[in-house]
Amino acid sequence: MSEIKYFTKERLEELKKELDELKYKGRKEISRQIQEAREMGDLSENAEYDAAKDAQGLMEAKIAQLEDIVARSRIIDTSNMDTDKVYLMSTVKVKNLAMKKVFTYTIVTEEEADLKQNKISSKSPVGAGLLGRAVGEIAEVELPNGRILKLEVMEITIV
């Protein structure tokens, strides 16, 4: 069985919208391109036809992938989550003990991770190291370079 994917309601809606656009607008456009290429004559030496068929194959693969993701998706309900520990969708303020700097991260799924928005994956070293921690605890996170990063959990909120 495939892994369940967790998303915010907004992200799941974005995925569904993308899927609908590919299924209806995308398929229609590819069909039009194939038809135009057919009208150009001999299909055995028709580069436009080959390109349109290749694009169709790639789009169908993307549609199948999105359908699979949507079928396995669950919405994360943050309305009844508490802030006693760091969970998926928690916003956590941490202090890097070596740098003496404070950082704020929101722990999200791999698909929603965006470092520019301080959204880190629950499967990243820092995200995984913070999961389950409570305020006051120190997470010792092993980084890919082998260094140990010590983060003190200062505050936990829910998005």
Image (cartoon, helix red, strand yellow):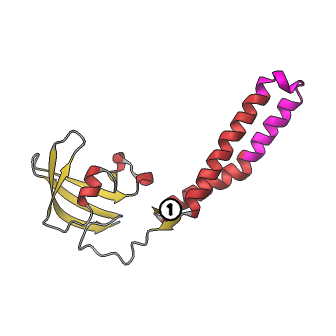
Residue furthest top as drawn: 45
- Residue at 45 percent of width and 63 percent of height: 6
Vertical arrangement, residue 88 with respect to residue 84, above or below: above
In this rendered view, identify the residue nearer to me: 2 or 109. Answer: 2
Amino acid under label 1?
Glu
Residue 107 position, x and y percent, is 33, 59
- Residue at 22 percent of width and 45 percent of height: 143
Residue 83 position, x and y percent, is 26, 73
Tell me: 46 left or right of 99.
Answer: right
- Which element carries disc 1, helix, strand or loop? helix
Residue 105 position, x and y percent, is 28, 55
Write down the region rendered in magenta: 27-48
In this rendered view, identify the residue nearer to me: 159 or 132. Answer: 132
Count how many numbered circles sit on residues in the image.
1
How dense is the environment of label 1, judged by Cα within 10 Å: few (below 14), some, or many (20 and up)?
A: few
Classified by dominant secondary structure, the portion drawn in magenta counts as: helix
- Residue at 20 percent of width and 48 percent of height: 142
**Quarter of the rendering containing residue 123:** bottom left
Residue 40, magenta (yes or no):
yes
Residue furthest front as drawn: 1
Question: Which residue is identified by label 1?
Answer: 10
**Quarter of the rendering containing residue 59:** top right
In this rendered view, identify the residue nearer to me: 3 or 26. Answer: 3
- Residue at 32 percent of width and 58 percent of height: 106
**Quarter of the rendering containing residue 158:** bottom left
Residue 113 position, x and y percent, is 39, 51
Vertical arrangement, residue 14 with respect to residue 32, above or below: below
Vertical arrangement, residue 28 with respect to residue 16, above or below: above
Q: Quadrant of the C terminus?
A: bottom left
Residue 153, magenta (yes or no):
no
